[in-house]
Image (spheres, rainbow, N blue to C red):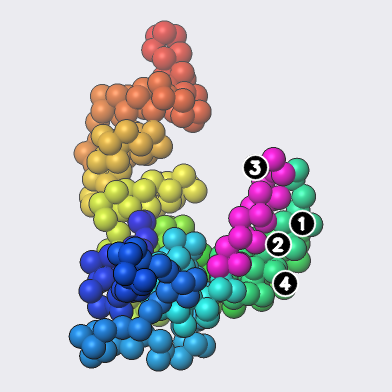
Amino acid sequence: MEQKTWPDRSDGSRFTAFPLSKPSNGDGKTKLSRRSKFISKPSSSQTDGPDFSALPFDILTKIAAPFNFPNLLTASLVCKSWRDVLRPLREAMVLLRYGKRFKHGRGGFRRNLEKALDSFLKGAARGSTLAMVDAGLIYWERGQKEEAIALYQKAAALGDPAGQCNLGISYLHAQPQKHKEAVKWLHEASVGGHIRAQYQLALCLHQGLVVDRNLQEAVWSSLLTHFNCIHSELLFLRIGMMGFALLLIDDTQARWYLKAAEGGYVRAMYNTSLCYTFGEGLSHSRRQARKWMKRAADRGHSKAQFEHGLALFSVKGK
């Protein structure tokens, strides 16, 4: 999902402008002080507008905690007070970038998870939820699940969809499992447009983990509201990948498979073939089943290649 840069450029007229200093010494040249590059006294025509500098700093830092660097840069240009308050988060973005380089061994950096974790934790200490999530991932991979969950909880509470998704998945892996909490956070992340959370939430529905009828309706409503057509195709495609391809497939879901297959999604071709083979959601048709199985096989789908090969072998043996 494309995230909208905030504040949006179309909203520019609502923000205090930054007029240049008046020419000095009569030479017609404009001289800018270091301070005037960022902010100067607004004109009388602008004083009637909203005073964004009056926003409490603790609220501003919470709002900006999930921001990436472009969004932080945009917010920092609103006014001097915002620029100063958001400085720790801008520093966190630098630490986050170094952490990713250490984690993946990119940009001339040798792979070093210790240094990566250190950078992520320093970024998290400055309030960045992105750094919290990345630090949590390293802790989780190390088996330090309590430390990971603690970071996911902080990120989730600040509204980070990735943190909410990871927290929900963590609760599904907890001993004992915390289904209610997992569904709650997956639902929050889904509303925020997080694709993996939407997929996990759909799996929870299929597995019967969402027992509250009101919550079931809310979950389906949010999935349908926040999915566009392609997302719907991918959701049920991914469910099929996890072994739920033929679980409660109705006509609508089968059509999503077919549309995704026609759009070139290889696994959807395989699942469409299964629907035609077993008559699940689509009318039984061996010809269509073979057609889509061959297309999936030609594009490298291993299961489709195996089953298509068996079909060819059976034909030759007759």
Q: Name which residue type carries label 2.
A: Ser
> Does residue 64 show up?
no
Q: Are marks 2 and 1 in contact (CB under 8 Å)?
A: yes
**How far apart in space, not on screen, are marks 3 and 1 (Cα)?**
15 Å
- The residue under label 1 is 115
Q: Name which residue type carries label 1.
A: Lys
Q: Are marks 3 and 1 in contact (CB under 8 Å)?
A: no
Residue 116 vs residue 207: left or right? right
Q: Is residue 253 above or below residue 127?
A: above
- The residue under label 3 is 107
- The residue under label 2 is 119
Q: Earlier in the sequence, mark 4 or mark 3?
A: 3
- The residue under label 4 is 147
Outermost residue toward the front? Answer: 26
Residue at image location 67% in from the left, 63% down from the top: 120
Mark 3 crowdedness (10 Å alpha carbons): few <14, some 14-19, many ≥20: few
> Does residue 284 show up?
yes
Q: Please provide percent x and percent y for residue 222.
A: 31, 69
Quarter of the figure with residue 217: bottom left
| Mark closer to the observer (4, 3) | 3
- Provide the secondary structure element on which disc 2 rests: helix
